[in-house]
Amino acid sequence: MGFQKCMVLVNLPGVTTKNISTFRSNQYILQAGVAKVDIAIYWEEYGLDSTPPFRDTSLLNAGYTYEYVSPENLKLPGASVVNRYLSPDGPAYKALVLNWVQNTTLDAARQILEYTQNGFPVVLNTLVSNGLPGIDVNGTRSQEVHDLMAQLLTLPTVKLVQDEPSISSVLHRQHCPISSD
């Protein structure tokens, strides 16, 4: 199939074999390696029409790169903290931001606590944990999430802020340098 597509391009007017070779080389270079990202922003919403958890431009203005991670991302085999980096063989996040997170899964709360206990910086913007998504018949799982979030706040690598613009300055004070690449 790929060869047939290539042949179609060769038959287009103005497209030469050299163009295709250059295009192929550029695509290889662009896809080689692993993109490094400064900040992971926790996002549990899976709907396409939901509001993104970070609408402020302060992180971008400060030079930070970020992407969203879900509770499922935190379960991946490479999602561990080594030398203050989350997923060092992947994006090598330097911090995790929980921005107006209203609920989280119990597994994610446990995982985030483990990260912080290993020295990973976490910034919480306005802690509004209302428990966990889904059904919690007797409320014990919601209470456990609440207790884990309370434990987070006692750790030195965790900072609580009251607004989005404060996050970038807290990250800077937490020694989360901006990527130079």
Image (tube, helix red, strand yellow):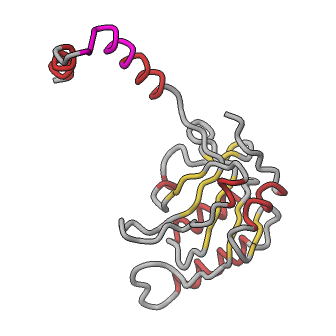
Residue pictured at 71% horizontal, 36% vertical: 180
Residue pictured at 59% horizontal, 44% vertical: 87
Is the magenta region chiefly helix, strand or loop? helix
Q: Report whether 7 appears left or right of 119.
A: left
Asked if the stretch drawn in magenta spans residue 22, the answer is yes
Residue pictured at 41% horizontal, 16% vertical: 25
From what the image shows, is residue 80 above or below residue 158?
Answer: above
Q: Position of residue 138 (x, y in %)?
A: 46, 91
From what the image shows, is residue 11 above or below residue 75?
Answer: above
| Chain part drawn in magenta | 14-23
Q: How many marks?
A: 0
From what the image shows, is residue 109 above or below residue 143?
Answer: above
Pick the residue in front: 119 or 179.
179
Q: Report whether 137 appears left or right of 88.
A: left
- The quadrant holding residue 50 is bottom left
Which residue is at the far front?
Answer: 14
Q: Report whether 117 appears left or right of 111.
A: right
Q: Position of residue 17 (x, y in %)?
A: 28, 8
Residue pictured at 53% horizontal, 77% vertical: 103
From the image, which quarter does the N terminus lie in?
top left
From the image, which quarter does the C terminus lie in?
top right
Asked if the stretch drawn in magenta spans residue 19, the answer is yes
Q: Position of residue 131 (x, y in %)?
A: 53, 82
Q: Report whether 105 appears left or right of 99.
A: left
